[in-house]
Amino acid sequence: MRFVSTVAHRFNQARYLPPSLVVMRVIAIAGIALGAATLVVALSIVNGFQREYSRAILDFNAHVVVLKAGEMQDLSSTLSYLSTLEPSAEERAFVEKRKWLMPAVETLSAFYTAAKKLHDDISFRFEDHPEFVDVWKRYSPERFARFAPDTVRRLHEIEGKGIHGITPFLYREGLAISKGIIKGMVVKGIDPETIRDVNRMRIDLTSGGDLSDALAPSAEEPAIVLGKALAEQLGSPGKVKLMVPEMIKGQQFITARVAGTFESGLHDYDAQFALMGIPDTRRIFETGPVIASGIEIKLDDPAKAETLAYRLNNDLPASYQAVTWGELNRDLFEALSLEKFVFSIIMGILVIVAAFNIIGVLVLLIVYRAHEVAILKALGVRDSILQRIFTRGGLSTGIIGTTAGIALGTAVSLAVKRLHLIRLEPEVYFLSALPIDISWTICGMIGFFSILMCWGTSGIAARRLSRLPIGGNL
């Protein structure tokens, strides 16, 4: 091993190489570095979009939304049921004493939920064949779950809870008019008392104070909180006129007092939504017995959304539907995942192409070192030893290029992030600046991939070249 290291070091030192070979090696390093840097920047941008979209969506929307066909006319029974899903003080203490078991329980819970969902889907598809369904029920995951220890089963039950906040909402559409400007908007009726348990977006009230006071019901001028972009489009008014499909007693317009603005982080939300108390929303839009469009639920961990939604869909009546935040925004995140995949493929090909430059470097190196290679073969050095020597030279080139590329990509990403060098059109991208999220895990994966490609191409070339007779055609 020491012999291989010594000879490889001697063969590849720049001071022992001709200028042409040094230039070729620098070009190979530069190609690998640019490929790795481009991959780091591209994936950091996609990660930034995913992070910002997820943060803004979860700031404006809840983790789980419970909807009902025909909207909700009575909330008491549903809210009463949801309150039972919040862990009690005793249950929290039970989990705290056994928190070392929770990672294993969460893994088993995810596996159990997936298995039960698959079992139920198969049962539904074969419901016209009762003889199969009767046999299939014997293999239900619920039967096998009974063999789990009592501690694990109780931890699983508590782990399925974790509700942090619950609040109702009521959606209606209307027009906002100010200074001759007309904008369509969605009015979201909220409960000011519970909205902050679910919603974390920034709300700036004109008069300061509490949101409950700002959106208190008013028979004369209802209070409204506009999205920041919507308020700017309307000229930052103190009052706006609302035109809604159902006018109160034949009124042509309803004047609303602007109590403040909110900023979710996504231009699409800030330009289309306005907040109003549910009582005022019901009165203005004349919703009659309809109290809410649905109920928003925030969890202590967004990863539990799928588990809770599946449980709610099984426990609530058929007219109810629980939807996760991922399902509500599936198209957006699928598009981002596809972009990340395409970027990885394209930039990965660039790295592979750059890695193949190492083959040219190795060929020139062996031509230049032909006399030394002949002496080594005459001394009895095996082809496998020569292959390792040549591979080390290519691998060192790859390591230098990959390290430089990751460093360059990280530096560029940090510069774009800190200095906001690239501005975006909020109407198109929903964000005003290019988001960057540098993942050291992804940087590690890029480094591993690049070095693996360099090692592979070096090994293939070295294996072939080490077996050529000195003086033969390369």
Image (cartoon, rainbow, N blue to C red):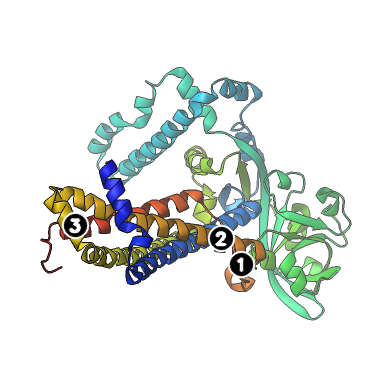
Q: Nearer the viewer, residue 277 or 418?
A: 418
Mark 1 or mark 2, which has the lower sequence index?
2
Q: Nearer the viewer, residue 416 or 235?
A: 416
Q: Nearer the viewer, residue 336 or 199?
A: 336
Q: Which residue is mark 3?
A: 373
Quarter holding the N terminus is top left
Q: Residue at x 68, y 68 (%)?
A: 271
- Residue 362 position, x and y percent, is 26, 63
* Relative to 377, 139 lies left or right: right
- Residue 71 position, x and y percent, is 60, 53
Position of residue 138 relative to residue 203, above or below, is above
Q: Residue at x 63, y 47 (%)?
A: 295
Mark 2 or mark 3, which has the lower sequence index?
3
Mark 1 → mark 2, Cα distance in angstroms:
26 Å
- Residue 254 seen anywhere in this rendered image of the structure: no
> Residue 411 bears which disc, if any?
2
Q: Which residue is mark 1?
A: 430
Mark 2 → mark 3, Cα distance in angstroms:
41 Å
* Relative to 95, 181 lies left or right: right
Tag 3 secondary structure: helix
Position of residue 31 relative to residue 313, above or below, is below
Amino acid marked by disc 3: Val
* Relative to 299, 352 lies left or right: left
Task: Using the rendered view, name the quadrant where residue 244 is placed.
Answer: bottom right
